[in-house]
Image: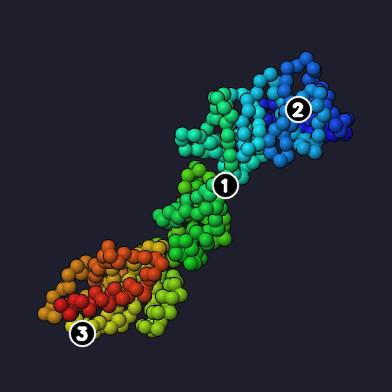
């Protein structure tokens, strides 16, 4: 008993059986209900790709393929895929038909065109087979990119799934345990995820991963509740000995006590604070803060330091110092270490003028 499958233009394949292992075309058609009077064409779908017409008196070699395509009528239209011949009973063909006929689902289909750029055949594209000549279609692997929004920063990856920890690393966050993390997918309620969770990026729209520091409790201050990068911690311990991290009103602060100022200021030592963005080092560190307020000789206030910032219920003097367009923040090379260089240069410049 020989088993096979067959389909009409709806490409809904059905199973059939025949006693003969090498029947002729008319015998196979009779086994599924057709007679010699019916106006049909029989095609064998070849294992190596392509289709081959089987005449009514021609013997069938099942080694070539056990799938058959039946065209009701006396006309079919030819086209090629990767150089192999195919036939189709209708004047139009879609991506769904190409997938079913060729069995190729892991590559993109393109229609060759002489005077225009080759056409990528997507779900909404219809290829007209009724024009002059034989339409030439080919396949190739096209790298597809997927987007994810991580706390406002969009990243692109070339795979449809990503582990949360991988996504965090791409925006410079090394440890997700300090955050509550929520994933929002278009049309779905947000769900809490963990560092080991897998995000499916193939769904419609851009997925959003939102991070909330675990240490924020009703706006109170949390002490020592976020970790600095290893290279930053090593630098801070070597240069300053002690430092601490806090979260105050949802903002992350690095605090250095007894920071020594250059000569010429109203104080010799102050407490210095810098704000560490949640997406650091992808996000830029900007400005710095000193407490108590410090002055230049004769009681002059340094320029652009008039604004106060309350941290831990204590007033800090904000130094509005920013990078120029020639030295914009680069997350690959910039860090807490390079920002302290900017602070030192800014403080020294004021008393050397």
The residue under the point 79% across, 17% down is: 36
Q: CA distance from mark 1 to mark 3?
A: 65 Å
Q: Quadrant of the C terminus?
A: bottom left
Q: Which residue is mark 2?
A: 54
Q: Nearer the viewer, residue 253 or 287?
A: 287
**Does the image show residue 184?**
no
Image label count: 3
Rendered view: 98 above or below 304: above
The picture places residue 50, in percent across and down from the top left corner, at: 68, 35
Which residue is labeled 3 in the image? Answer: 263
Please report contact status of discs 1 and 3: CB closer than 8 Å, yes or no.
Answer: no
Label 1, on which residue? 141
Circle 2: is it few (<14), some (14-19), or many (20+) Cα within 10 Å?
A: some
- Judged by depth in the image, the label closer to the viewer, 2 or 3, is 2
**Mark number displayed over residue 273:** none
> Marks 1 and 2, how far apart in space?
32 Å
Quarter where residue 62 is shown:
top right
**Which residue is drawn at the image coordinates 73% and 39% (left, top)?**
47
Residue 33, placed above or below residue 188 = above
**Residue sitting farthest toward the left:** 298
Quadrant the N terminus occupies: top right
SS class, disc 2? strand
Above-or-below relation of 93 to 222: above
Instruction: Name the secondary structure under disc 3.
Output: loop
Coordinates of residue 228 in the picture (x, y in percent): 43, 72
Q: Is 234 on the left or on the right of 128, as rendered?
A: left
Q: Are marks 2 and 3 in contact (CB under 8 Å)?
A: no
């Amino acid at each position: 008993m020989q088993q096979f499958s067959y389909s009409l233009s709806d490409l809904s394949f059905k199973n059939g059986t025949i006693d003969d292992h090498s029947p002729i075309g008319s015998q196979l058609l009779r086994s599924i209900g057709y007679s010699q009077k019916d106006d049909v064409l029989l095609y064998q779908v070849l294992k190596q790709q392509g289709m081959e017409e089987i005449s009514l008196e021609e013997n069938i070699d099942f080694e070539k393929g056990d799938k058959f395509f039946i065209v009701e009528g006396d006309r079919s239209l030819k086209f090629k895929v990767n150089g192999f011949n195919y036939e189709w009973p209708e004047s139009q063909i879609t991506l769904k038909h190409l997938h079913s006929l060729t069995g190729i689902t892991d590559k993109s289909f393109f229609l060759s065109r002489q005077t225009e750029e080759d056409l990528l055949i997507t779900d909404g594209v219809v290829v007209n087979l009724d024009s002059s000549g034989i339409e030439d279609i080919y396949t190739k692997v096209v790298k597809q990119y997927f987007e994810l929004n991580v706390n406002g920063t969009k990243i692109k990856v070339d795979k449809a799934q990503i582990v949360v920890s991988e996504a965090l690393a791409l925006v410079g966050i090394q440890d997700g345990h300090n955050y509550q993390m929520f994933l929002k997918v278009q049309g779905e309620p947000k769900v809490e995820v963990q560092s080991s969770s897998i995000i499916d990026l193939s769904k419609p729209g851009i997925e959003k991963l939102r991070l909330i520091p675990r240490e924020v409790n009703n706006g109170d201050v949390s002490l020592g509740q976020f970790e600095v990068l290893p290279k930053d911690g090593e630098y801070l311990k070597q240069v300053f000995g002690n430092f601490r991290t806090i979260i105050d009103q949802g903002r992350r602060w690095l605090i250095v006590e007894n920071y020594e100022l250059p000569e010429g200021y109203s104080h010799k030592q102050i407490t210095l604070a810098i704000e560490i963005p949640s997406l650091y080092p992808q996000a830029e560190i900007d400005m710095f803060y000193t407490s108590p307020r410090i002055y230049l000789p004769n009681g002059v206030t340094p320029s652009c330091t008039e604004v106060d910032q309350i941290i831990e219920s204590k007033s800090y003097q904000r130094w509005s110092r920013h990078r120029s367009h020639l030295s914009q923040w680069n997350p690959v090379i910039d860090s807490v270490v390079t920002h302290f260089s900017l602070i030192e240069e800014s403080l020294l410049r004021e008393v050397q003028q």
